[in-house]
Amino acid sequence: MKENWESVIGLEIHVQLNSESKIFSNAPTKFGSNQNLQACEVDLGMPGTLPVLNEKAIEKAIKFGVAINAAIAEKVGFARKNYFYPDLPKGYQISQLDDPIVGKGSIEIQLGDQEIKTIGITRAHLEEDAGKSIHDLFENETAIDLNRAGTPLLEIVSEPDMSNSDEAVAYLKKIHSIVCALEISDGNMSQGSMRCDANVSVRKKGEKKLGTRTELKNINSFKFVERAINFEIKRQISVLEKGEEIVQETRLYDAINNTTRSMRSKEEANDYRYFPEPDIIPIQITSDQIQRIKNELPELPDEKKERFINELGLSEYDARNLTYDLELADFFEKTLVNIDDPKLVANWILGDFSAILNKFDAEANNSKVDAVKFAELLTYLKEEKISGQATKKVLENIWENPDLSVSKSIKDLGLEQISDDNEIEEIIEKVINDNPDQKEQFLSGKDRLFGFFVGQVMKESKGKANPKLVNEILKKKLV
Ligand code: ADP
Ligand code: MG
């Protein structure tokens, strides 16, 4: 970013709650059924139908509120937000305006080894989702799938507390890990179970007043959030540097071309002619109910992180990265059942194991190498039966050939480490005999030639000699 500008970001995150039925009807919410089979007459607002509030949605929203230490409303009322759009045939969305179920709260994020930053959460409210417009199914025509209509959403609105795309992604990841830990959503971003609108503005450094913002709609991956925000910051700065003004509007991020384009000018709340939803009476939430939910909270990501640090001796950095992704944290703990070396396991999970998940576009819970096998592999490494390099090769090999055992893979690839003193001694003697000049130079003070000998021994053993033993024995022999 150009030096004299700073950016400000606030996120609105839509989390699809994982209830079995819709928020105001008993139609199913299952993902992936055939089009237009899961919206019932209530979801479509047919005359003569009445919505009935799903208790589970209320519970799940309270769970989230309690987890972020937010105030929970005593009275929860709904409001009608009126607008017309093809994917909203009933002409209004039931949402919340003045009494959101979750009030002010906060979460903490941390980047690298920077200080912890608190991000304020303004509110989180319940609402129903709309249907989906599908633009790429028929040429020049748009199809509408109403299955999603009425699916319960929790919209989490942040304060404009983030200063760049990295912080926005860290915040989004933290929210993701919290809703997954609470099991109130499956958190599946590619299926749209969690999507976010990023509000972005820029201002001159030192300026107190916020700049005019644009809102980037419906971004559904961590990577796209980062790219969309970065693109938009650059665009706004260049507009302002030309002496022009930012128009407050809703923009779409185009992932293919990595650009944003205007979608519509920004509506104000009064454009929606909100009024209290007459078909649902406000409900009362009791302190007993809140207390019960508090008592039943599972371990939250921050608590897990502290446990990994205090009980397993992980670094803050490793613990944080493992607990961003609960599946990874789970895989980590499952691996530890069979190998008691948290530091080693954390290193490998965050390093090569994550890399292989990435490469094959997989998640820890559908890994081709399960935690038991992974622990077995790391045990070979820990007992110095194979080298680190060899461990990587075996990991790839058993990933690509799930039926292969660790021991068979090591044999097939010829990677068994040589840890036999005599065998290594023999190789070392041969290398020393083959390089008399270097030996002479080493003995007359050229210390760095030690590395040359290590290298030659490793080469001679085709990388299989145990490096620790090679070092030890070489020191004895090079005299
Ligand atoms: P709306 O519902 O119309 O989008 P809100 O006032 O609820 O409006 O704000 C939505 C989001 O925009 C919030 O997350 C807030 O933090 C963020 N936001 C508001 N003003 C700015 C700004 N100037 N720059 C960046 N983000 C902003
Ligand atoms: Mg908005």
Image (cartoon, grey):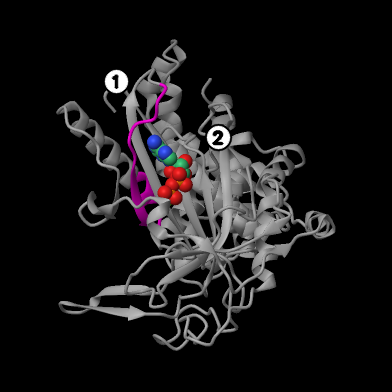
In the depicted view, which residue is nearer to us: 178 or 46? 46
Q: Amino acid at mark 1?
A: Glu
Is residue 320 visible in this depiction of the protein? Answer: yes
* 277 falls in the magenta region: no
Which numbered dot is residue 160? Answer: none
The quarter of the picture showing ligand 1: top left
- Asked whether residue 214 is drawn in magenta, I would say yes
- Say whether disc 2 or disc 1 marks the residue closer to the N-terminus: 1
Residue at image location 39% in from the left, 15% down from the top: 441
Magenta residues, as a range?
208-226
Residue farthest to the right, as pictured:
288
The reply, left or right, for residue 370 in relation to residue 238 is: right
Q: Residues within 10 Å of mark 2 (few under 14, many from 20)?
A: some
Whether residue 222 is visible, yes or no, is no
Q: Amino acid at mark 2?
A: Gln
- Verify CB contact (< 8 Å) between mark 2 and mark 1: no
Q: Residue 3: which disc?
A: 1
- The image shows residue 376, relative to residue 430, as above or below, that is below
Task: Give residue 379's position: percent from left, percent from top.
Answer: 65, 53
Extreme residue in the top direction: 445
- Indicate the secondary structure of the residue bearing disc 2: loop
**Image location of residue 126, percent across then percent down:** 57, 61
The residue tagged with tag 1: helix, strand or loop? loop
Q: Position of residue 220 (x, y in %)?
A: 40, 58
Q: Nearer the viewer, residue 278 or 205?
A: 278
